[in-house]
Image: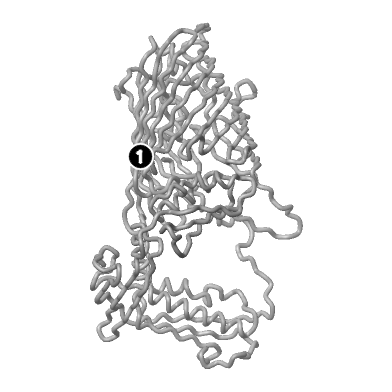
Amino acid sequence: MRNENTGRTKKRRLMGGAGTAAMLAATLLLLPPLAGDAYAFKLFGITLFGDNDDTLEVIDPVRYDATLETGNADKDLKKRLESAASLVTDEKQPVSGDLGVIIKAREDRDRLIAVLYEEARYGGTVHISVAGTDIDRLPPNPTFDHGAPVPVAVRINPGPLFKLGSVRFDGDLAGRNPEDYDLETGGAAGSRLILKAGEQLLVDLKKEGRPLAKLTERKVTADHRTHTVDVVLGAVGGPVAPFGSVAVKGSRTVDAAFISRYSRLDKGGRYSPDQLKKANDRLRELGVFSSVTIHESDKLAPDGSLPLIIEVSEGKHRYFGFGAEYSSIDGAGVQGYWGHRNLFGEAESLRIEGKVSGIGATTDVSTFDYSAGIVFTKPGAFVPEATFESRLEAKSETPDVYEAQTVIYSATMAYELNETDKLKGGGEVAWINTDDAFGKNQYVTLSLPISFERDARDNKLDPTEGYYATLSAKPSYEVLDGTIFSSFEGSIAGYLGLGEEDGIVLAGRLAAGTLVGGDDLESIPATRRFFAGGGGSVRGYAYREISSYNNADEATGGRSYALGSFEVRVKVSENIGIVPFIDVGTVSTGIVPDFSDIRAGAGIGIRYATPFGPLRLDVAMPLQRYDGGSQYGIYAGIGQAF
């Protein structure tokens, strides 16, 4: 190892009013030319500009004027009925012909009655009249006066609230406790609750390994004298069966035998709906299929097993993309990538990527951050549970605390021990050139990283229950100076949902790490020392701002760290949530954190639910700001912070 201490002065980038860095992902959008016509643009269902009403051409348009009376319905029921009455919600949109009014009215009546049943109003009535005549008394092809909008009147009598009376399970359901399925005498009796109980009973039968289980009876009797509902549910479980032969349909370039093997359904284990779902998810995550459907046979094979058919539709295997980002401190960044998802016919993937950031922060291109890499991944390597990855990456980093040029090659094997646990190990060689508080140094390290992961979350992007834990060790040998050192890290995050449909989720994460070995910090590369701060650790501080500092106020990094994050995720609507949070962290020069300098950041975030996970925007302030340090931070991304 060569040390050329040149008395380097720590570089600090200018901080504007925005304070800390906030990397905001930006999607590049191709907008239509705005010449003459009006355009509307929506992002994630939100109208950003233009008219929100997309008026379609209607043949023989007929306009109507609808009124809605909900009788003695309470506030919540009234709101549900108003939302379900499309005659009212779509009143500004004409229907096609006079018959279109009748069709819409009949559909509304069915929908409104369903709402009443869902709210346990089994004695409720819905009357709809058009031009003063009940829809059941109108001729098949009515004709209305179009001198004015056709009058439509919707009158609802909600009726009394019903409660559950007797509940009986018959057949193979006998002996189960109705209360375990939220069916309790004197309790709620909504139709949705009863349907859900029947569905869950069927699921539970199938979880016992009975693929042919089916409901044979679902009888609901309303007693209008006592305002109670009696329920009878019956089912036949059928025999317990293992998975049988697995056929594959729809594959073109992906090997069918690989699909069957990678699904892990061909091992003949006992039938399980959970295993079917996990096999479906596992195949989808390969990225080579646009759709995956697993069909179960409606009868058992002669040997008593259940035949399966995996039907797939292959997507495009080659892809490319690009993106942009901006930071108030680090400037703009651009990135691009190209990939192939099925190199040799068994979902082997190759991805080539590059990124340049720091554009605009300075005029010196040598201070930009650069990275380029190539990654090869082989799923189902040797056994279906194993995934091999080979990665070559080159980086030039210039955060405020150091400069580093790195070339790393790694080869790792990940093995799924079971449904929640994964073990990963391999080898890594790295060349690292740094300029930091200890001057200019070069390192060549050989490492044997190993890690264990347990993922017991119910959802990876937006968990509401369960936990996620990791343990890792990275023993290393620095070739140029003969230094032996190792890093050890661990983390655990837990989630607890509260209230109806998990309207409030308590989330917390703890993490810690230590570096052992090496004569001093200088003998360990800056990229392997511990720093904290930024969106992945303590929000409100700049990236890697939390560190041990020497007498010259230069960040040296540390041998140990401890982090904690706590969030309260509150849904304010179906798609919108707010998240107050606090993060704390410390970095120490000893192998055990001494907690002498604890830094904390607090803030609030907003979440917008999308099919691919919540969009996240957090704003945080440091509670113990460094002199001249960041004032606040803004962080954006997809998925929860942890």
Residue 432's spot in the image, x, y percent? 53, 16
Q: Residue at x 42, y 76 (%)?
A: 114
Residue in the foreground of this view, choosing between 601 and 476: 476
Indicate the quadrant where residue 221 lies. bottom left
- Sort mark 1 into few (<14), some (14-19) or many (20+) by Cα contacts within 10 Å: many
Relative placement, left or right, of 138 versus 567 is right
Reading the image, the residue beneath label 1 is 493
Amino acid under disc 1: Ala
- Quarter of the image holding residue 103? bottom right
Does 407 appear above or below 73?
A: above
Residue 343: x, y in percent? Answer: 63, 38
Q: Residue at x 54, y 22 (%)?
A: 408
In the rendered view, would you say 414 is above or below 520?
below
Quadrant occupied by the C terminus? top left
Percent x, y of residue 286: 54, 44
Whether 536 is drawn above or below 272: the answer is: above
Picture coordinates of residue 181 (x, y %)?
Answer: 29, 64
Q: How many marks?
A: 1
Q: Quadrant of residue 557?
A: top left
Residue positioned most to the right: 36
* Residue 349 visible in the current orientation: yes
Q: Residue at x 51, y 32 (%)?
A: 388
Q: Nearer the viewer, residue 490 or 573?
A: 490
| Residue 566 seen anywhere in this rendered image of the structure | no
Nearest the camera: 66 or 448?
448
- The figure's colour scheme reads one colour
Q: Secondary structure at mark 1?
A: strand
Tell me what residue is drawn at x 36 percent, y 65 percent: 238
Drawn side of residue 582 relative to residue 174, left or right = right
